[in-house]
Amino acid sequence: MIRTRTALRHGRTAVGVLLAGAALAACGSGAPHQGSAAVVGGEQITIAAVESRVTGLRDAVAAESGGRRTTERAGLVRRTVAELVLNQVVDKALADRRLTVTDGEIDEARESEAKLLGGVAELQRELLFKQSVPAAEVSAFYRQQLGIQKLAAAQGKDARSAEGDAVVRAALTDAGTKLRIEVNPRYGRWDVKQIGLTNTVSDWLRQPAATTA
């Protein structure tokens, strides 16, 4: 299901696309993807970037919980890959519709929810433990969530409604198809219709063409 900002106050509620798993077949030609967690629209998401983000999240959780680290590393890595891919899919869907999310809108949303929760520290703690979003990724979180809301609002729908969910899913499915997303099979495969990861494994590193004597 797609998270919207109301998910912050009511758990992971709202529209359509929560990370399912991993999937997407390789495109068939092009350079090998050594070191890539995914390739989205020709842009690489590196394994190093994913690992860095996961380490940062685990360190943040440990700092806030007296040194106790989250043990769910495998699921966390996969979810991080899915979030990074989804961010780019949302950006593509917005760009196709000439919609934008401004820094001012992000700041306004963050300040509004910080006020509701009793301050910035409380907001960051809520995001960290309930949404797995460390402080460094808060702006990206709000950009994604506001983008999802705008995709629905552009068609006069609320992203939390069934109709809004359908609008958002259609937009993200279209964007994901255009981006030709490839995911390293260690994380699974991106399913453009489910808008998330599935467990199907496909070829990843390009094999050299066979030669004949």
Image (cartoon, grey):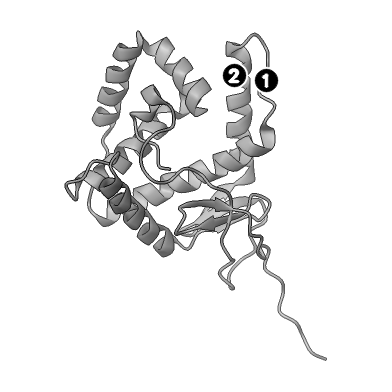
Quarter of the picture holding the N terminus: top left
Q: Residue at x 45, y 23 (%)?
A: 127
Residue 153 pos. (x, y %): 20, 44
Q: Residue at x 64, y 29 (%)?
A: 55
Looking at the picture, how far across and down is residue 9, in whole percent? Answer: 37, 22
Would you call the spot at circle 1 few (<14 residues within 10 Å), some (14-19), or many (20 or more)?
A: some
Name the amino acid type tagged 1: Arg
The reply to whether the C-beta atoms of the residues labelled 2 and 1 are less than 8 Å apart is yes
Instruction: Identify the amino acid type marked 2.
Output: Val
Q: Secondary structure at mark 1?
A: loop
Residue at (49, 24) in percent of width and height = 130
Give the crowd class for mark 2: few <14, some 14-19, many >=20 residues within 10 Å. many
Looking at the image, is 4 positioned above or below residue 25? above
Residue 141, quarter of the rendered image: top left
Secondary structure category for the residue under label 2: helix
Vertical relation: 31 (above or below) 52:
below
Q: Which mark is residue 22?
A: none
Residue 136, relative to residue 17: is it above or below? above
Q: Which residue is mark 2?
A: 61
Task: Give the camera-side residue of 38 and 160.
Answer: 160
The answer to which of marks 2 and 1 sits earlier in the sequence is: 2
